[in-house]
Amino acid sequence: MNNQFTQSTRLAERATRVIPGGVNSGRRQIDPPLVVRWARGAHMEDADGNRMIDYWGGAGSAVLGHSNPTVNERVESAIKNGVLIGTALTPGEIELAERVVDYVPSIEQVLLCTSGTQATYFAIRLSRAVTGREKLVKMQGSYHGYHDSVLRNVHSTPDRVYARDPHSAGMLPAAVDNTLICRYNDLHSARSMFEAHVGEIAALIIEPLVHNGPTLVPDPGYLEGLRAICDDHGALLIFDEVVTGFRHGMGGYQEIANIRPDLTTGGKAFASGWPIAFLGGARWLMERFNTSPGGDVGWSGTCNGNTGCVAAALATLDLLSDGTVHTHITRLGERMRTGLHEIVEEAGIPATVTGYGSIFTLWFAEGPINNYEQVLRNDSVLFKSYRQELRQRGVWEKPDMHGARSCVSACHTDHDIDLTLTAARDSLKAALSRIAASRKRKHQGVLDV
Ligand SMILES: Cc1ncc(COP(=O)(O)O)c(C=O)c1O
């Protein structure tokens, strides 16, 4: 308790002189500041020597835990023979493609790139080329990377939900306007959008199970319904499995739901956090890329297929493929959700424990949480305060509503779950009394400092 953050604060101040905002990706700023010295297994240590059980896990990439020794050894051995050959092909790239094709039901061919954003970008470009159409459908609140076609209506405030809501300055207006926004878990919303734009929509992109924020689980029949709507309208269905892929099983969420999208993107857990991602789909679609003779859809990238990332992916798939890790992390995920549920019942506050498999989130709103409007009901003050209290007790869950998912890894143990649930109970009490005290002071006209 009462961990000090003086070194983190000092380093973060130094960083802001040379790095805008002091971090290398939006939404990484932490209050109070955090500088991480190391992350191994299920733990990390900050610059002040505070140890924490980490549930952010590199945005879910660290499915095997941080810095898995087998993955590291395989990378080390691979790069001795060249890091980025960048011409023609290496044997590892063939093996990796064969493995992805074997595991993911809808994929007949696959191409590698280096980020989830690139994968969704190429998926959309391909769908426009194949259909000769320009428009794209995405869901309110979904995140598929930072390129212009998908970066609208991501973290919309209540007044901007379903309105024209670009997430960044500098986005090309035409790209923003060509993306149409629907409600997740609402087939009527998708159907009426397609009916209002007959012959104009190239693709619908969706995280089949939403993990940006609290988990949104698809209602029975929802994904089947989207499949049918896309078929009826000659549009492609893109499953963005950058978070779900290989975390929930080897075949992605599409295998669990038994739905076959036309295109699938993957990344994150695919290679334990090494920068590699993929786009896969049916042969007739994938052969449109100019990696095939006569292909007319551009695909390139200097670092695609580099030996270190390919080795990391192969090693990760080796370690995941027998299902032991998935069984372990799902069991611990369930323990965590059950334990958190008991804690909020005891506290008697409006809260919902969301999640799936190894992912969990405690959301401070009455359930159900099935779409973005319901996500917005979260008590953001309590949410932030609770997660700050967790940090004080050696548990790291990112205190950001939009980066809210917490992930169990192969290295977490039952003991970690026990410690976390104790910390959760205490943190919730502390956060509630801190907020009550602050409200009382405000009521009495005393300014909070
Ligand atoms: C569902 C989803 N798609 C795509 C992306 C973009 O991936 P990357 O950050 O590797 O570009 C993310 C990143 O969080 C994601 O969660």
Image (spheres, rainbow, N blue to C red):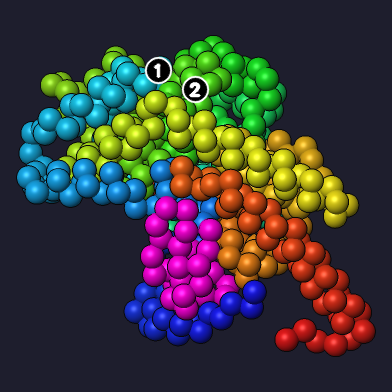
User: Which residue is denoted by mark 1 in the rendering?
Assistant: 106
Instruction: Find the magenta span and give its range.
Output: 28-53
Residue corresponding to mark 2 = 254
Q: Position of residue 79 (x, y in %)?
A: 13, 48
Find residue 61 and report its horizontal and vertical position in percent: 42, 46
Question: Would residue 35 be counted in the magenta stretch?
Answer: yes
> Residue 165 or 400: which is nearer the viewer?
400
The correct choice, above or below, for 17 with respect to 184 in the image is below
Which quadrant does the N terminus fall into? bottom right
Q: Is 293 included in the stretch rendered in magenta?
A: no
**Does residue 368 appear in the picture of this structure?**
yes
Left or right placement of residue 417 versus residue 309 in this view: right
Is there a contact, CB below 8 Å, between mark 2 and mark 1? yes
At a point 26% along the width and 34% down the height, the residue shown is 314
Name the image quarter holding residue 381: bottom right
Give the residue displayed 46% in from the left and 47% down from the top.
411
Q: Amino acid at mark 1?
A: Ser
